[in-house]
Amino acid sequence: MAPALAWLTALMVVPCALVLALAFFRRGIYGGIEYTFTLENFGQVLDPLYAGIFLNSARIAGAATLIAVIIGYAAAYAIAAAPRRLQPVFLFFAVLPFWSNYLIRTYAWIVLLNREGLVTQLLRWMGYTGEPPSMLYTEGAVIAGLVYNYLPFVILACYAPLSRLNPELAEASRDLGASALTTFRRVILPLTVPGIAAGAVFVFVLSIGNFVTPALLGGGRFQMIGNLVYDQFLTANDWPFGAALAMALIAIMLAVLMAQALLADRAAGRAKEAEGGADG
Amino acid sequence: MTSSPARTLGLRTILVLVFAFLYIPIAVLVALSFNAGGLPTAWSGFSLKWYASLAGNAAILQAALNTLIVALVSTAIATLLGTLLAIGIEMRRQYGKGLEALIFAPMIIPDIVLAIALLSFFSLLDVTMGLHTIVLAHVVFNLAFVCSVVRARLKSFDWSIVEASADLGASALTTFRRVTLPVILPAVVAGALLAFTLSVDEFIIAFFTAGAGRASTTLPMQIYSMIRFGITPEINALATIVMAVSITALTLSQRLNRGVIGQ
């Protein structure tokens, strides 16, 4: 145990603590770090210019999360409703793309959305004759890339509670006269909230700190927090500010995770009530 | 669940659409890697020439070799440490929440944060960066994955056979080699394959801990720069090979250790 823990301490805990410490120092005149305590970096994070990038990241990550949850939930629902023996197969193939290289999956979208890519050719084939639409290097492309990359995890997270649902609950709801939609909204949906929340948090957290997808599919035109951190460390050489940005990113992440934990607790309580009701 | 024909049709349509969404981008990429034409998007006949030109590209071969070295060394270290860690944790159950958090943290911390943390750390200590620093960094997150796969297996492990072995006079090492290891071996191999794949595919942390110069460029770094600075059909061929390797390793890992990865 000891060597593994030593490894994690030396190469994770200490470096992360170092970044936290960096955030409280000043940037040296010639780059580098001047070791005087300051809160300036955190002030700079709140500067409208950078706060705007935070909001923009949250918006893009939020849109990707919403779309991924809708598609992922529908897919998980369909898989959970498939014959039992097919479910593991469907699930395996739903997750398989997730285990191939992130860059390659993102690059596949460049190929698709390219001016002469498959999407344009499809439009031509359907009778479109105008200029190729500009799809690459747009916010939509960034969102599509994020949804594509993280969708498998949403499917997995939503499938878990859906496959465990007691079918008698839905039957009971129908027997009591509820329509399919009401049953879904009042019975199935509330019981699967923990899965949705887990999937949503995963997409949101990974999207908001992402820098590869905005850099490749956004053509560098859509700055997100990840790109900003990247720039501060590798281009601007302002490590203290970059560190403060990274801390802000972690803070957002922790807030989202805590909200999810609260939600999961409440949903677990409700699920217990519902199960109790069904048994009794 | 009761099913009406309309509902069944609806559910099937969803599945077809979602799988199309997941696989069309990959299928197009793979198909274009066999495209004779120089254009990365228009089809003009079957050819293996992009695979041949990969074989003659010194930069890519160097990157592939670097990736292999990093993945093999970091997997070996992470498998050893991660397995010992998993056994240690499962044997004494009185570990706290803090330990749990420490082990899972690398799976949760955003890559970019861990990457800049390691970059700051290495430059503060004046460590020359290269393949060795990438290995050090990769072990951090590989450890977490190996440990969790092995732990899942140990949950159903019957510790009384370890006691029996000790009672019969076997040393701790003999017990581990002859009793514990054979039982958990599939999980250890599954964990190693997972670590290997993650390491082959990892980009952000390697990018920040590689230091300057081509000597320590890994395949994902090579792919990133190829995508950013001019698309050539070679990327399609390279992407196809990398995907095939990852997917084979993970399918094997999944088979050895049913379900654990998905959880």
Image (tube, rainbow, N blue to C red):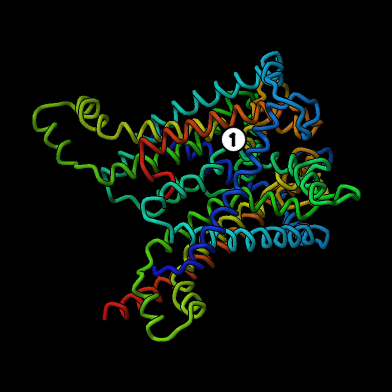
Q: In this orientation, which residue lies closer to the viewer: B176 or A79?
A: A79
The residue identified by callout 1 is: B202
Residue B123 visible in this rendered orientation of the protein: no
Counting from the top left corner in percent of width and height, residue A55 is at 74, 62
Question: Is residue A148 shown left or right of residue B156?
Answer: right
Counting from the top left corner in percent of width and height, residue A75 is at 53, 58
Residue at image position (45%, 69%) is B4
- Circle 1: residue type: Glu
Question: Is residue B171 shown left or right of residue B123?
Answer: left
Looking at this rendering, what residue extends furthest in the bottom direction?
A177
Counting from the top left corner in percent of width and height, residue A49 is at 83, 59
Badge 1 marks a residue whose secondary structure is loop
Counting from the top left corner in percent of width and height, residue B233 is at 75, 27
Residue at image position (63%, 24%) is B130
Which quadrant of the figure contains the N terminus of chain A? Answer: top left
In which quadrant of the rendered view does residue A31 lie?
top right
Residue at image position (70%, 24%) is B46
Q: Is residue A210 above or below residue B72?
A: below
In which quadrant of the rendered view does residue B157 lie?
top left
